[in-house]
Amino acid sequence: MDDLLKLDKQLCFSVYVLHREIMQQYRTILEEIDLTYPQYITMMALWENDEQTVNQLGAKLFLDNGTLTPLLKRLETKALLTRTRSKEDERVVKVRLTVQGLQLKEKASCVPMQIFEALKLDYADMVQLKALAEKIVNNVGNS
């Protein structure tokens, strides 16, 4: 039983190291398109569905408004998106991509393949790792 307390036996440590490695690879690759990782995932969510409310975006990205609002402000400063209050309900803020934001999608299209290469993963490995990660998130989220 004592062996279970060794660092190399800990799932949390392996996941922590993996997270750091993946984020470092993203950081390096995303510098080329002048985005941070949180900005990148926000842009991906908007490329999938251009007009969303801040609340919809936060739910999709698992980010609270306190984290998302400054992130959106920085993307707005970069002229990649706009935020406007709903005419029907002033409490609702809608987020839309600008032309520059839409054009950035083409520059970012190489990021996934660069990540596969940087992590020395093939597509099947990535699918397997992603499926396991989603299983854990779903199991924990449903308890």
Image: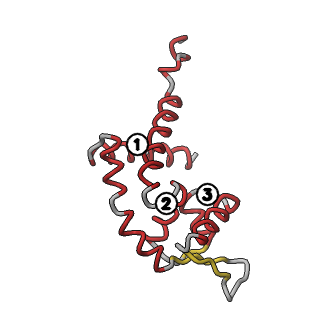
| Crowd tier of the residue under label 1, counting other residues whose Cα lies within 10 Å: few below 14, some 14–19, many 20 or above | few
Q: Amino acid at mark 2?
A: Asp
Which numbered disc, 3 or 2, marks the residue closer to the eye? 2
Q: Quadrant of residue 63?
A: bottom right
Front-lying residue, 134 or 67: 67
Q: Quadrant of the C terminus?
A: top right
Residue 34 is tagged as 2
Label 3 vs label 1: CA separation? Answer: 22 Å
Residue positioned 49% across, 66% down in the render: 43
- Is label 2 in a helix, a strand or a loop? loop
Residue positioned 68% across, 77% down in the render: 92
In the rendered image, which residue does mark 1 sit on? 132
Q: Amino acid at mark 1?
A: Leu
Dot placed on the residue nearer the N-terminal end, 1 or 2: 2
Residue positioned 50% across, 38% down in the render: 20
Residue 122: where, in percent of width, then height? 26, 45
Residue 42: where, in percent of width, then height? 52, 63
Which numbered disc, 1 or 2, marks the residue closer to the eye? 2
Residue 54: where, in percent of width, then height? 62, 70
In the rendered image, which residue does mark 3 sit on? 63
Label 1 vs label 2: CA separation? Answer: 30 Å
- Is label 3 in a helix, a strand or a loop? loop
Q: Which residue is at the far top? A: 2
Which numbered disc, 3 or 1, marks the residue closer to the eye? 3
Front-lying residue, 39 or 31: 31
Q: Is residue 75 left or right of residue 67?
A: left
Q: Amino acid at mark 3?
A: Leu
Q: Which residue is at the far bottom? A: 87
| Crowd tier of the residue under label 3, counting other residues whose Cα lies within 10 Å: few below 14, some 14–19, many 20 or above | some
